[in-house]
Amino acid sequence: MGMRNFRAEKGDRPRLDRLFLRRFLTLQSVLFPRWMSENVLMLLTLLVVALTGQLVVYQVGILPSQFYGVLANRDPSGFRRLAVLAVMLILAISLLRSVEQYIGKLVYVNCRKVMTEHLHKLYFTKQVYYTLSTERPHVDNPDQRMTQDVERLCRELGTVASKLLITPFTLVYYSYQCAISTGWMGPLSIFGYFVIGSLLNRLLMGPLIPKLVQQEKLEGDFRFKHVEIRVNAEAAAFTRAGLVEHSRTAQRLQNLISVQKDLMNQELWLYFGTNLFDYLGGILSYMVIAVPIFAGVYRDLSAAELSELISKNAFVSIYLVNCFSQIIDLSSSLCDVAGYTHRIAELDEAMRCILQGQKDEDEEAKELQPCDAVFVLEDVTITAPGSDCTLVRNLNVHVREGSNLLITGETGSGKSSILRVLARLWKPKRGHVCVFTPFGPRGVLFLPQKPFLSDGTLREQVIYPLKEVFPNSGQVDDDRILRSLEMSGLTCLLSRTGGLDHKVEWKWSEILSPGEMQRLAFSRLFYLQPKYAVLDESSSALSEDAEIELYTCCRQLGMTLISVGHRRSIKNFHDLELKLGPDGQWDLKRLPKQHAPGDDQ
Ligand SMILES: Nc1ncnc2c1ncn2[C@@H]1O[C@H](COP(=O)(O)OP(=O)(O)OP(=O)(O)O)[C@@H](O)[C@H]1O
């Protein structure tokens, strides 16, 4: 299957090979999906501007030889005409070059937008962002790949795009011009020089690509450490973790710097080769014209005509050498492009594999017959991703509407794992799992122990994620929001935020206490009022009385509950208890009917 392919390739050292070419073309098909797409049109405009620029460059390049001519002939009117022409040409070339740079930047920004949007689309579909971090082996630092690596790849592409497009044309044109004055030996010897240069370059560049990829990974690891400390600043401060974290962060920096130094040492020889090639190219132009001059081809020319010819030929050959050295320079850019391409394509492939796997599961699920139960687990065996240790073995549970299930067991026995399987975050190792109700307000909502509080106003927190995910969910009812806040005991938040729609400066997850966060999650539940609620220790940070109040509200609203919890008090709200034991054992029993608050409503 796809995932197996992805893993096999991932083990390879990244290189400039067929895998790179395939990945590069895949990414290009994302950036340039159709012939008439925006990026293709921009590239075409860039090509036209760059080609026009080259015509003017040639005219500007032969100006010195024309000046030699008019000055050597002492021709004042010719000199004036030439000076006016020179100013106009310089104005034109300045304008064309600026437009070329501008379009290059536009290509960069647009490519970044298209590529990031493409990756986002995969990343945020069907919890791929979660699966990506639990799959083994996982793709390191997906955040860095989507932000920094994409940015650098597109910047590099924007910079080299015009050079890549224009070089074939300039090569042909200047080879022809060079051949006119030196014969075909001129461009041929420049070409031979280029072949030697590029072979040398390829040799020097080979070992750099794996190092570049490694550097990017370590860069991501280093940044992640800082993010980890920022996100857990309070817990770290309580633990007095400064010293330990300092040394661990320093260790990551050290790893990064040592790879960067290795890379720099290897690059030194690449830079030496590139510079040598550039400067030797400068003399080569005089060597190629020297041959016909000493052979007597130009013996009939006057001194003025000969210096005009030498100047013109120097420009043409230097430009030709320059075209070739640009190709060599492009090869160092290619090295960076290859590093980023491998990293972005790995992420792209991993995400596509995950989505393909989920599509296959959807197909399998469609074949299962609906039954009267809403949640069905048949012969389900669960292991954590990348682990062989069985958490639950051959589990059979059917949950029907109105029949509330409580899952209990020791720490680490696999209670939350069952919910992960129900939420389709994890695949069961064996067996069938079916949820015959949609995820969302009219179906089932999951409340984790630590709720996810994204940015937004108080109103957006309560109705989250109603507007974005379910745009046809009707008018947002203010009274209902206020009632939900009241039921969850959070009316005080209204005065703290300054109202439902007041933009808050703080981060909700940093300011609210764990108990307040859990209450806010319950106010979401009371606002959205799904038929089924899955509560994973969602009230663990609250007092027993508060927990009873919240469960009472759930019952009053007619929700069927699947809960994970430790307290005896919540047993009254459930009809079935699934008790997990060691080594994957489990026991399902009916709880004695007791009078739970809210039953009489
Ligand atoms: N993403 C993961 N990768 C590997 N192992 C995991 C992963 N998530 C959980 N586990 C392991 O699976 C086991 C069961 O975890 P689970 O969260 O289901 O426990 P639990 O019964 O809910 O515990 P608690 O009562 O502490 O919440 C634990 O040993 C945990 O370390």
Image (spheres, helix red, strand yellow):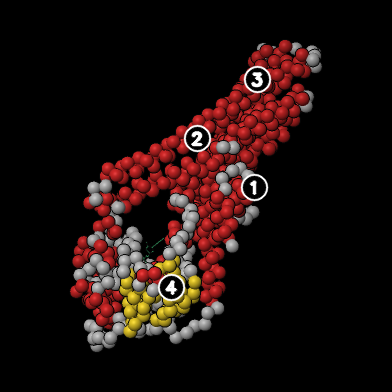
Q: Nearer the viewer, mark 4 or mark 3?
A: 4
Q: Residues within 10 Å of mark 1 (few under 14, many from 20)?
A: few
Q: Which residue is mark 2?
A: 263
> Who's the residue at 55% across and 55% down the image?
7
Q: CA distance from mark 1 to mark 3?
A: 37 Å
Residue type at mark 3? Ile
Residue identified by numbered label 3? 283
> Type of residue at label 1?
Arg
Residue drawn at (34%, 43%) of the image: 248
Q: Tell me which residue sits at (41%, 79%) in the image.
A: 397
The residue carrying mark 4 is 393
Q: Nearer the viewer, mark 1 or mark 3?
A: 1
Residue 18's label in the rendered image is 1
Query: Relative to 434, does residue 314 appear above or below in the rendering?
Result: above
The disc labelled 2 sits on which kind of residue?
Answer: Leu
Viewer-side label of 2, 4: 4
Instruction: Please tell me in which quadrant of the rendered image residue 532 appears.
Output: bottom left
Q: Nearer the viewer, residue 24 or 107?
A: 24
| Residue 458 position within the rendered picture, expressed as x and y whole percent measured from the top left | 29, 64
Disc 2 and disc 4 in contact, CB within 8 angstroms: no
Residue 34 visible in the snapshot = yes
Could you say which is closer to the camera, residue 171 or residue 72? 171
Callouts 2 and 1 close, C-beta under 8 Å: no
